[in-house]
Amino acid sequence: MSNINISNLSFKYPDSSDNIFNNLSLDLDSSWKLGLVGRNGRGKTTFLNLLRGNLRGTGKIQAKLEFNYFPLTVNDKKQLTLYALQEQVSFEQWELERELNLMKVDPELIWQPFNSLSGGEQTKILLALSFINKNSFPLIDEPTNHLDEDSRMQVIAYLQQHSNGYIVVSHDRAFLNQVTNHILAIENTEIHLYQGNFASYEDTKTKRDKFNQDKNEKLQGQIRSLNESRKRVKGYSLQSENNKKASAHKNEIHAFINKGFFSHKAAKIMKRSKNLERRMDKNIQDKKGLMTNIESISELEMNFHPNYHGTLLEAQHLDLTVQNKKLFEDLNLTIKNHGIVALEGKNGSGKSTFLKNILKPDKNVISQGKLDIVNGLKISYLPQNFIEYSGTLSQFAEKEKISYENLLNILRKMGFPRESFATKIEEMSMGQQKRVAIAKSLVEEADIYLWDEPANYLDVFNQDQLINMLKKEQPAMLLIEHDKYFISQVTDKRIKLGDVKAK
């Protein structure tokens, strides 16, 4: 057991005037299983890179530990997995096999070329690699992306049985609740440490935000009252100043107007008024200083137009085969003109292939059974991968024939940094690319939505935005998703693809 001491750490990128972190101090125990959470673009990966020494800030990071980062980038993916990994990391074969056995993963996979492994297999092997060195402290960045439910449970059981501490970045609430006992939450330019799992942190944060919101509303009321009083005082002062003029007393019966008397009286009132105004201004500024900055979640909207047909898509006893391999069989589902249906199943079971085939039938995909789709449907498709998206946002909007203004508006609501609006999509982070893809789908006019893993790469704030919007709109949607919380919040019906029966 060792400590990770961070003192007065500040960091900003050379092309930015704003600090990512400002005078950050933390004392972490290396036996803790820490979840690192925060909004996309607020510095989670930056923090991991600072710990690894890949970035340098001011202040100190002290630790008698070796930091291992997941996912390792494999240089030669055509090599056998064992040799490809040993070229980059020093370890013995038996050490990797030990970790794979603990994860209930077949060790024989290391004798296959790395690029022949599925995404889930690659993820599990690279995660096992991070735990080979017992004196290391793993930094695990988004391990659950694209993993099906069974694979997630494998990873959860593996992390639970390890005595090693680690930091894991994830936006999967259910996953974090099972593999963490402390939470590091990035809030503005600070990182706050919470004891307990994500649910405990979320409960604490919700109560704190409610307290701060009530306090802010009370302070805002006091500020409004002070501003009204300030206006009245200023009115008295102006009235007194006007009293110095003879014209102000033209209706009074005076043989002689004592200008000196009124000037002296006005000056005294003016002085008292100015002093009172200054005290009120200071009081207003003090109360503004007591207000707490609470991250609010903007409401999203989608360009959904319910179709007049009651049923838009229906599959009955449908089998799907690609290159003589049956992906699934006996699928029965119905998509109405309102309501969200989740299609669940293991990686490789044909979910994404089914969505793509609805969008554009593929001659290599052979279907048996019945699939009825209403003619002329306006379909909005959210792909799992975004390699086809490129160019600047304005070029992208023109190519996709969507409103550039509406695209930017949704991106702003999702916390997309304005300075990235001119960045080409292919040069953006995965979190930014995902938000562009979602914003495109929301801007498009649609009768039905085909969404493939919308929660991947999104922070919990963005996920909550989608959840709130989908609950409100209840669009016609066929949804593929592995995040249990997201599915439980938005779906009307869940359909699971079973294993294909052996003939």
Image: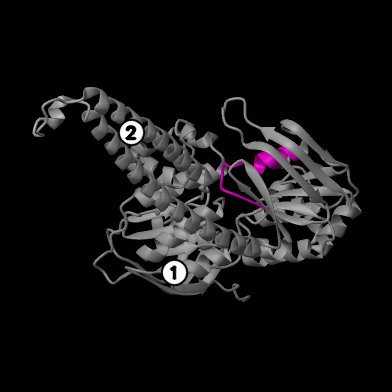
> Which residue lies under the disc numbered 1?
341
Find disc 2 in the rendering and name its residue. 269
Rendered location of residue 178, percent (x, y): 70, 65
Image position of 363 (left or right of 458): left
Query: Along the polypeptide, which appears first: circle 2 or circle 1?
Result: 2
From where the camera sits, is residue 363 visible? no
Q: Nearer the viewer, mark 2 or mark 1?
A: 2
What sort of colour scheme is used for the picture?
one colour
Q: Is residue 58 left or right of residue 316?
A: right
**Could you say whether the residue bearing mark 1 is in a helix, strand or loop?**
strand
Instruction: Find out whether residue 99 is within the magenta segment.
Output: no
Q: Give, as a single range, the part of the protein colored magenta.
A: 36-51
Q: Position of residue 60 (x, y in %)?
A: 78, 35
Residue 311, located in which quarter of the rendered image?
A: bottom left
Secondary element at image label 2: helix
Marks 2 and 1 sit apart, C-alpha to C-alpha, by 72 Å
Residue 381 position, x and y percent, is 41, 53
Toward which corner of the image does residue 373 lie, by quadrant?
A: bottom left
Q: What residue type is disc 1 on? A: Val
Residue visible at 46% across and 61% down?
A: 467
The residue drawn where x is 66% and y is 46% is: 191
